[in-house]
Amino acid sequence: MPNFQSQLDYYADRQCAPQWRSFLLSLAEELSQQLEPAELRQLMHTLGRRMAAKLPLARAATLEDIGASANAIWRELNFGWVECREQEGFLQLLHYADPLLAAFGDDSDRWAPALLEGVYEEWLRRAGADERLRLYQQGERGQRHQPLEFRLAAM
């Protein structure tokens, strides 16, 4: 009987549609050869902002509304889910079960999360977040199945 970790690996690998897997892995390899990680992060961040503009949140008056609207979109796209938490001095976004590693490969974890960073930044700006606040990825994912953490805070 497979252990819990192997079950998680099985489901994580299926988060990228099979018809796109070889294309996206090849694209990630080529981009990694052509661009530095900082350039790839910027590209993904820009793509994330464009993606957010095409997938606008429903009108949201509260942080709970923002999370619910975002999760409705993520559910439709099979892109995991987000938890939004107010912390002292910052807003924390924890994104679980993202398909980025399945789509772009394990080596993409240094730059691919910037896609979500761009999405969340755009959504929060459109929801009224102060322009002086910055959204950024907090640290790196320690293990494949850990959530990605983003923070909105004054820099």
Image (cartoon, grey):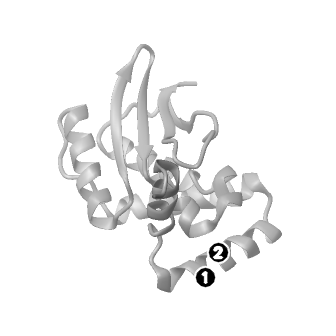
Query: How many marks on residues?
Result: 2
Residue shown at the point (73%, 57%) measured from the top left: 39
Is 73 left or right of 30, judged from the image as shown?
left
Q: Which residue is mark 2?
A: 25
Viewer-closest of 69 and 109: 109
Secondary structure at badge 2 equals helix
Residue shown at the point (55%, 69%) measured from the top left: 103
Q: Quadrant of the C terminus?
A: top right
Viewer-closest of 97 and 86: 97
Q: CA distance from mark 1 to mark 2?
A: 5 Å
Amino acid type, callout 1: Ser
Q: Residues within 10 Å of mark 2 (few under 14, many from 20)?
A: some
Q: Residues within 10 Å of mark 1 (few under 14, many from 20)?
A: some
Q: Position of residue 118 (x, y in %)?
A: 50, 51
Is residue 38 placed above or below 137 in the rendered structure?
Answer: below
Amino acid type, callout 2: Leu
Q: Position of residue 99 (x, y in %)?
A: 48, 61
Decide: marks 1, 2 in contact (CB < 8 A)? yes
Secondary structure at badge 1 equals helix
Viewer-closest of 25 and 67: 25
Q: Quadrant of the N terminus?
A: bottom left
Instruction: Check residue 121 in the rendering and tell me which mark sits there, or answer none.
Output: none
Is 55 left or right of 62, judged from the image as shown?
right
Q: Which residue is mark 1?
A: 22
Residue shown at the point (32%, 57%) measured from the top left: 74
Residue shown at the point (42%, 30%) measured from the top left: 92
Is residue 61 placed above or below 79 in the rendered structure?
Answer: above
